[in-house]
Image (spheres, rainbow, N blue to C red):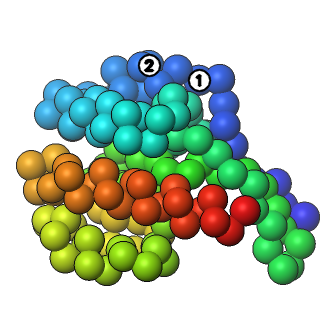
Amino acid sequence: MAKNKTTETDLSVEDYINQISDEKRRNDIKELVKIFGETSDFPAKMWGTAIVGFGSYHYKYASGHEGDAPLVALSSRVAQISLYLYPDSDDKADLLKELGKFKMAKACIYVKKNEDINFDILRKLIHSTISKIRNFN
C-alpha cells in the first residue's frame, strides 16, 4: 500500500512562512495562521513541506487505505492560497455564499488574497469542519 506523502513533520512553520518571497502573500499567510490557530485552538504544525495544519485525525477508507491528516490546513501555492476545509459540512453551502471571492475544488478553497474573504465566515467554516470531522471519528 502506498505511503502518505503528507505527514506531520518537525519543520518550522515560521521558516516556511519566511521563505515566501512575496511580502503581501507572506503577511496574508501569517494572518491566516493566526486565525486558524485561534479558531481551531490547535498549534500550527507543518505537514509535508508546504502545508500548515491544525490538529489531526486518523482516517480509514473502505479500501483499507488509512492515515492521519490535519483537521484544517492552509498552504501558499504559486497562484493562490489553498484553504483545506472539509467539503461536506451541513452549513458549508450557506457559509460559502458569504465567504467572498474564491474558487473551489473538491476539498480546497482557493483565495488570491485575504481582502477577498470574510474572516468571520472563515472562522465559522473552520469550526464547522472540525465539528464534522470529529463527529465521524
- Confirm whether residue 52 shows in the render: no
Residue 11 sits in which quadrant? top right
Q: Is residue 1 left or right of residue 86?
A: right
Q: Secondary structure at mark 2?
A: helix
Q: Residue at x 42, y 55 (%)?
A: 127
Q: Mark 2 belongs to which amino acid? A: Asp
Spot occupied by residue 95 in the image (x, y as percentages of width and height): 26, 71
| Residue on which disc 1 sits | 11
Residue 117 sits in which quadrant? bottom left
Q: Closest to the observer: 107 or 39? A: 39
For the N terminus, the quadrant is bottom right
Q: Residue at x 26, y 78 (%)?
A: 94
- Confirm whether residue 94 shows in the render: yes
Q: Mark 1 belongs to which amino acid? A: Leu
Classify 14 as above or below 115: above
For the C terminus, the quadrant is bottom right
Classify 12 as above or below 89: above
Classify 21 as above or below 55: above
Would you call the spot at circle 2 few (<14 residues within 10 Å), some (14-19), or many (20 or more)?
A: few
Q: CA distance from mark 2 to mark 1?
A: 8 Å
Q: Secondary structure at mark 1?
A: loop
Q: Which numbered circle lies on residue 15?
A: 2
Q: Are marks 2 and 1 in contact (CB under 8 Å)?
A: yes
From this viewpoint, which residue is outermost toward the left?
A: 115
Q: Residue at x 35, y 49 (%)?
A: 77
Q: Closest to the observer: 93 or 12? A: 93
